[in-house]
Amino acid sequence: MRIVKHANGGADPSTVTAVSPAAGASLGDDALIEISREVSRGRLVRRYAVFLLALLFVAIALGALALPAQRALSLTALVVCIVCYVLASRVGFEYGGVFAIPTEAVFVVMWFVLPPRMIPATVCAALLLSQLPDALRGRMPLDRLALAFASSWFAVGPAAVIFVWASGPPEWQNLPVYAGALAAQFAFDFAAVYLATRAVLGGSLTMHVHSQLPVYAVDAMLAPLGLLIAFPAYDHVASLLLILPVLLLFATFAKERQRRIDGVVELSGAYRGTAMLLGDVIEADDEYTGSHSRDVVGLVLAVADQLELTPDARRRAEFAALLHDVGKVKIPADIINKPGPLDDAEWEIMKTHTVVGERMLEQIGGLLGEVGRIVRSCHERWDGTGYPDALAGDKIPLEARIVCACDAWSAMTTDRAYRKARPGDEAAAELRRCAGTHFDPLVVATLCVVLGV
């Protein structure tokens, strides 16, 4: 199952300042994890969707207890199920700000060893117990225990299916019913997670489906194991304890995955820190160039989100926007700050800054090495008359085409040493006039939508 444990399901939307309304469709898992970890320590402020889901779940779970029992409750079965579920819940695989926990096999056994009416309440109780140690140790605010209720909705669907169509012992001829119970689990879980996360990350329905597929794939693979254990566990519930070695194996895998994720997040932060440091170097050398580059970043990310760039392309565009002028640190200051137009010789020197920037970033390597190739192309033109390689049309990297248009808008609407800023409507008219020659027409149209001009 998927437990809403961090920001995506439990953060105050006002604290997630790094995510634009459309960014959820573009952010990669590592970016979502960074955001999630940043705000997971906060309280559930104004997250009405989470609290409403929690209250509705409590009402449904308590109401279900009034239904016929259908089978006697075994206290031993209840304790064994809760213990195994709590242990499974403590094993988490992090996916883009939420945790996939390998509880499915235990959950399927619950279908057969507990009265169906008690399944939702039992799952919720186990989730509460699994999170209580973190709350008591101060690792999470107490109000985040509400997420245990909101994350338990997945149990309602299967409990209803089993209650109506398969309340007896496990039987192979009931496989279609069990498949229906699993489908109901996914449907209820998706609806609850979607409602809890949409207010924070936005994004399309398709994006939310894509983000949950890996978790549901894990559940689908663990469900048959749970069904196999359910046959002996129906008469001897202690058979469920056979799953503990599997959970230990999962815990080992989860720790290894966590180490890799930590490394990726740390590396991502190092790249961003390096980019910001280079940006500070630019600003120290030329105040206009530094502040201008930072202004362009926001526009580039907004356009990238509108165009639904992949997470990797979005990140390259972000860094290219910040560093597209990094090569200017090698250009003489008297050329950079000249109050009038450059002469031919000065212009030839100025045009070398894209190649210089590429070389500087290639020396760093890794992601910034990739960004260097985009920086080289940020002054290419759609019609092939740009520099340094006279690339044209789609041969220019899309990230560079976005930076080029956003850079031009920022330059036109900012005071320069040799002229005053142009009004927004005039700058927008110039962008449209040059679409198809200087700029990519699609990028210009998207930028105008972002700017509302």
Image: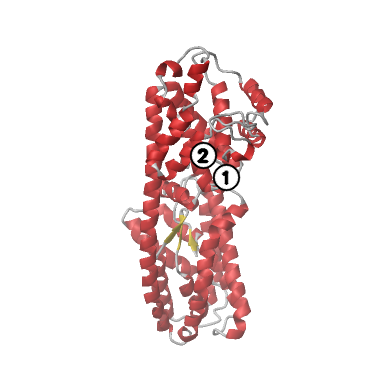
Q: In this view of the protein, which residue sits in the foreground, 403 or 70?
A: 403
Residue in view at x 50 percent, y 48 percent: 47
Percent from the top left, x then y, of residue 348? Answer: 50, 22
Q: In this view of the protein, which residue sits in the foreground, 310 or 404?
A: 404
Percent from the top left, x then y, of residue 299? Answer: 55, 33
Residue farthest left in this picture: 137
Q: Is residue 196 above or below residue 284?
A: below
Residue in view at x 45 percent, y 35 percent: 358
CA neighbours of label 2 inside 10 A, class few (<14), some (14 to 19), many (20+): many
Report the disc number at residue 317.
2
Q: Is there any visible trace of residue 61 in the rendered image? A: no
Going from N to C along the chain, the mark reached first, 2 or 1, is 1
Secondary structure, mark 2, is helix
Q: Quadrant of the C terminus?
A: top right
Percent from the top left, x then y, of residue 68? Answer: 57, 78
Secondary structure, mark 1, is loop
Q: Is residue 141 above or below residue 413?
A: below
Estimate the spatial distance between the alpha carbons at disc 2 and disc 1, rounded to whole Å.
9 Å
Report the disc number at residue 67.
none
CA neighbours of label 1 inside 10 A, class few (<14), some (14 to 19), many (20+): many
Q: Is residue 231 above or below residue 288?
A: below
Q: Is there any visible trace of residue 436 in the rendered image? A: yes
Which residue does the numbered mark 1 point to in the structure image? 309
Q: Quadrant of residue 304?
A: top right
Q: Quadrant of residue 308?
A: top right
Q: Are marks 2 and 1 in contact (CB under 8 Å)?
A: yes
Q: In this view of the protein, which residue sits in the foreground, 213 or 429?
A: 429
Tag count in the figure? Answer: 2
Residue in view at x 60 percent, y 74 percent: 179
Amino acid of disc 1: Leu
**In the displayed structure image, the side of residue 125 where residue 160 appears, left or right:** right
Amino acid of disc 2: Ala
